[in-house]
Every structure is written in structure tokens, then in C-alpha cells.
Image (cartoon, helix red, strand yellow):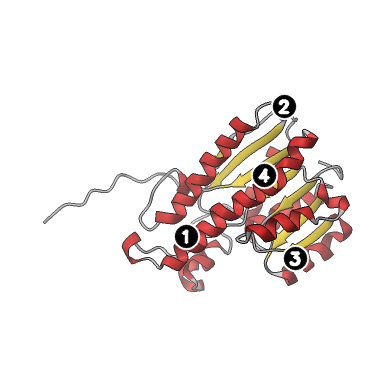
Amino acid sequence: MDSTHVALVTGATSGFGRAIAERFAAAGARVVAVGRRAERLNELAASFGDRVHPLCLDVRKPDAVFAAVAGLPPEFAAVTVLVNNAGLALGLEPAHETDWADWDNMIATNVRGLAAMTRAVLPGMVARKRGHVINIGSVAGAYPYPGGNVYGGTKAFVHQFSLNLRADLLGTRVRVTSIEPGMAQTEFANVRFGDDTKADAVYAGAEPLTAGDVADVVLYAASLPPHVNLNVVELMPTGQAFGPFTVHRER
């Protein structure tokens, strides 16, 4: 990893995205740090000087995404690594009790935003015959749980979209990886519940993954030789595993 690489990282203001942006910048790459909170982006850029370009952007707005990518400064325009990290979960209610606005927000961010950013960056990668799309999915895309409804569905999209990109990009030298973490302690639960006490309870007594753990995996995937592609990486904390099937019994 060196200054010939430009990593565009969405959701770079906190959690996985912030850690990923920091890893790439520390490794010598130039970084386009994308997020909605300008003050946090500017703070990140100040830590790494001219290696980080802060880009305040809402990925839920495709026209803004296309315009922003087309308008990147020349030294940041040739993106070699796209990390689609921006995403969120909202609520944990059963499907029939959820707020439609929460579903709409998750679909807009986790699906439409990820797809728009990929479509904006991909033609340049293909033209240059150099690039790597790294999508941050979740074990929720493979393993259902009560309250996962639309969130899990959006992450299943990320998984399948990544595999389909691999099929389309055969022969272009552009790589695609879906990285799918399990329990990780970031601001994720705080956003999901809108309540710090409830968020803290999720991790009580556990040893979850950290943002740095996931960032290390992302950097590793991106640093492999160009002929090596990690298709899917699933990671969990050692203290998390799979539960039994549930059965409802009439009494």
C-alpha cells in the first residue's frame, strides 16, 4: 500500500469507516473520507494532512454521489480501493410493528447508497484495469434473527451484489470482496436504539470485535497481490456463535 493508491471510504466519521480510513492513510495511501458530519471529517483530515480529502456527502442521494465522484480533485480522482462502509440498522421490533421510515432509511443507505457509489467509481477502475471494491456486509445477511427483518435483507443484498460484481468484472482485473462482521462495538447499537443505555447492554459481559479488528481485515484484503481475490470474509468474536432453531409451541 503506497501513495499510488487512493482509497474512498464511506461512513468515515466513526466506527469501521473511521478506523479503515486511518489504516489506509497510515499505510501511505491517499484517502477520500466520505461522511455527513463535516467536523469529524475535518478532524480526520487534520490528523493526516494532505493525504486525506474530506468529502461531506449523503450517499442516499445518487445524483450527489455521481457529482461528487466526478468532481474529485485530480490527485484523488483515480480511486483504486472503494470501501462501501456507510450503513446502519434502525430498531429491533418485529416486522409488523416497525416504523416504515426506518425501513426506508436502511434501504436508502445500505442498498441504494452502496449501489450508487459503486456505479460512480467502477467505470474508472475498469478503464484503468486496477481497482478493488470492498463492501461491508454483516453476518445478519446470512443468519436471520428476530428484529433483523429489513436490516438483514439489505446485508443479504450486499453479499449477493458483491458476488454478482465478481461475475461481471471477470477479465477487468478489478477485485470485489464482501466483508461480513458479527458483533462489533462501535456507534452501531447507539444509532439502532437511539439510547446509550440500551446500546451498552448489547455488549455487557461480552468481548465483541472492535472497529480496528475489521479495519485490519479490510487493509489485509486490499494489500494482497493483484491476482488474489478474497470473495467473502466472515468474522465474529470468539465469544459469539450460532444459536438453536426456535419453535413456537401452543400451550
Amino acid carrying label 1: it is Gly
State the separation of the CA atoms marked 2 and 1: 42 Å
**Left or right placement of residue 77 versus residue 62 in this view:** right
Instruction: Give me the disc on residue 36.
Output: none
| Marks 3 and 2, how far apart at CA | 33 Å
> In the rendered image of this protein, does residue 232 appear above or below residue 32?
above
Q: Secondary structure at mark 1?
A: loop
- Decide if residue 221 is on the left or right side of residue 143: right
Q: What amino acid type should be assigned to the residue bearing mark 3?
A: Leu
The C terminus, quarter of image:
bottom left
Q: Which residue is mark 3?
A: 41
Q: Amino acid at mark 4?
A: Val
**Closer mark to the observer between disc 4 and disc 3:** 3
Q: Is the Cβ of the residue at disc 3 closer than 8 Å to that at disc 1?
A: no
Give the alpha-carbon distance from disc 3 to disc 1, as whole Å: 32 Å
Q: Which residue matches tag 1?
A: 205
Circle 2 Cα neighbour tier, 10 Å, few/some/many (<14 / 14–19 / ≥20) = few
Q: Which element is circle 3 on?
A: helix
> Horizontal and vertical percent for residue 107?
50, 57
Q: Earlier in the sequence, mark 3 or mark 2?
A: 3
* Amino acid bearing label 2: His
- Per the image, the residue denoted by label 2 is 227
Badge 2 element: loop
Tell me the quarter of the picture where residue 168 sits: top right
Give the residue at x 66% y 46%: 119
Front: mark 4 or 2: 2
